Amino acid sequence: MVDADNTQLNHKPSADTFLPLSRVRTIMKSSMDTGLITNEVLFLMTKCTELFVQHLAREAYMASCAKQSNDTLKYEHLSQLVNKRKNLEFLLQIVPEKIRVHEFQEMLRLNRSNASDDEDESCTESESDDE
């Protein structure tokens, strides 16, 4: 388990935030149907966001260090964590696993061939029903 003192990166607890409050307010206004965002709500949302990002990064780092001795946290570590954890599935579209273009093209080709096979089967069934 990670020591609580080390999770704050040797920062003393304070009312300051790392994320800019004005940016968080802009995101909240664009994402929510709300008119007035009080300073207290803005501060709490900013702090919660910072804690969530720290938690996400820490968990991904710990999972990647368990597999490798590398000290670098990469995008793939975050996406693997999101794909493994049920409680993070809401981030699947935001932090998807990266795939190569040829893999994506192959997936599209398979989907198209499956769709055409399904259409052929439904046409065959409807023709036999007509007889």
Image: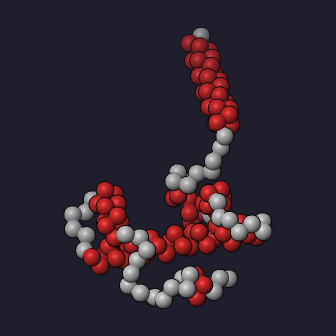
Residue 22 percent across, percent down from the top left: 31, 67
**Image colouring:** secondary structure
Quick check: 70 left or right of 43?
A: right
Residue 82 as seen in the image, left or right of residue 41: right
Which residue shows up at 56% across the image and 59% down it? 89
Does residue 89 lie above or below 44 as drawn? Answer: above
Instruction: Please state, as top left, top right, bottom left or bottom right, where the C terminus lies in the image.
Output: top right
Nearest to the observer: residue 90 or residue 124: 90
Q: Quadrant of residue 121?
A: top right
Q: Is residue 108 above or below residue 51?
A: above
In the displayed structure image, the side of residue 83 where residue 20 appears, left or right: left
Q: Which of 112 and 8 is in front in this view?
A: 8
Asked where in the image residue 45 lies, by quadrant, the reply is: bottom left
Rendered image quadrant of residue 67: bottom right
Of residues 126 and 118, the one drawn nearer to the viewer in this rendering: 118
The answer to whether any part of residue 123 appears in the image is yes
Q: Can residue 107 be seen in this view?
A: no
Which quadrant holds the N terminus? bottom right
Q: Where is residue 34 in the image (x, y as percent from the top left)?
A: 25, 63
Residue at the outermost top position: 131
Which of the two residues, 68 or 35, is positioned nearer the viewer here? 68
Task: From this view, report whether residue 91 is shown above or below residue 106.
Answer: below
Residue under the image location 64 percent in, 36 percent down:
101
Q: Name the residue located 48 percent from the left edge and 89 percent from the top edge.
A: 12
| Above or below for 51 versus 127 | below
Picture mark count: 0
Residue 52 location, x and y as percent?
Answer: 50, 71
Give residue 76's position: percent from left, percent from top.
65, 56
